[in-house]
Amino acid sequence: MQWAATSCRPDLTVISSILGTERHDPTVAGIKNMERMLHYIAGTVDMGITYRVHTRMSSRSLVKLLMYADSDWAGDIKVSKDPQGRSRGGYIITLNGNAVHWSSKLRTIGGEPDGQAEIDLASAQAEIGTLSEGCRRLIWLIRTLRSAGFTVPTVTVYEDNQAAIRIAENQSISERTRHIHNKDMFVRNLVRAKEITIKYVKSAENIADFFTKILGPTVYRTFRDRIMGVARE
């Protein structure tokens, strides 16, 4: 299940990550969620990502990367047996409109899955941390594609927290940003180098929200179909 969630079934990513936090000490609610997920998998066994050829590019060597990022501030309070106020960050990167990388995990110091909990003092801190984490993967993709001979223009990154956008675009350090770790400011380097540009997107249109929490059925299906190529943007 974990393999599918990280390679071909982004619709399983959040629930797989949440259930993974209980792997050493399962709860009754967790077991019931596992049963629901297995029923869902049984009903969608033929589902997978559909990759489409992008015909609007002016050159075959030109590729278009996009990233969406979001965070559910202190989200583990709602789903964890032992809540610590940790935020769940999620992001997705698309290449010519097709999902190529996505992530959903609780924020930790250093970014390691079993690392010490990262307690964000404000929603903007959680958002800027997720932005920087996603951008570290994004810059790896940019460099890999360019080394293979592809042209990658400035990448648009979509974010729904305007305070986080201001922090990312402002190169100075203030009292409001002093508590944010240097590693979480990596996104500033990319903005300054014009590798990325950050644009605001409404929360209802931010598909990265799909990777931050369990959504209601209607919103879940809408984002799932969009991310997996079932529905055209």
Image (spheres, grey):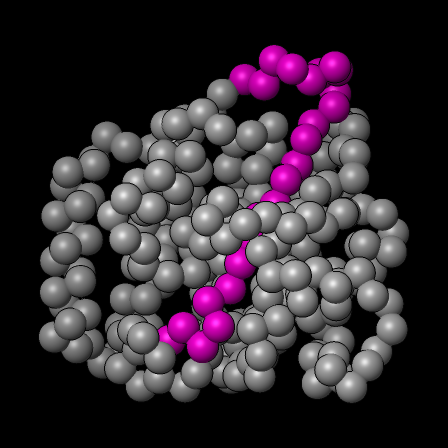
**In this image, 20 relative to 31: left or right?**
right
Q: Which residues are magenta?
A: 53-76
Q: Decide whether residue 202 is among the magenta residues.
A: no
Q: What percent of the width, then of the height, locates residue 18? A: 32, 66
Q: Main secondary structure of the magenta part?
A: loop
Q: What percent of the width, then of the height, locates residue 37? A: 19, 53
Task: Compare residues 115 and 223 and report the one nearer the observer.
Answer: 223
Question: At x 69% / y 70%, what residue is drawn?
Answer: 184
Q: Is residue 82 above or below residue 56?
A: below
Q: Is residue 213 above or below residue 228?
A: below
Q: What percent of the width, then of the height, locates residue 140? A: 70, 48
**In this image, 90 relative to 24: left or right?**
right
**In this image, 151 relative to 88: left or right?**
right
Image quadrant of residue 32? bottom left
Residue 219 in view in this figure: yes
Question: At x 41% / y 86%, what residue is drawn?
Answer: 84
Residue 103 in view in this figure: no
Count the marks: how many?
A: 0
Q: What percent of the width, then of the height, locates residue 228? A: 40, 34
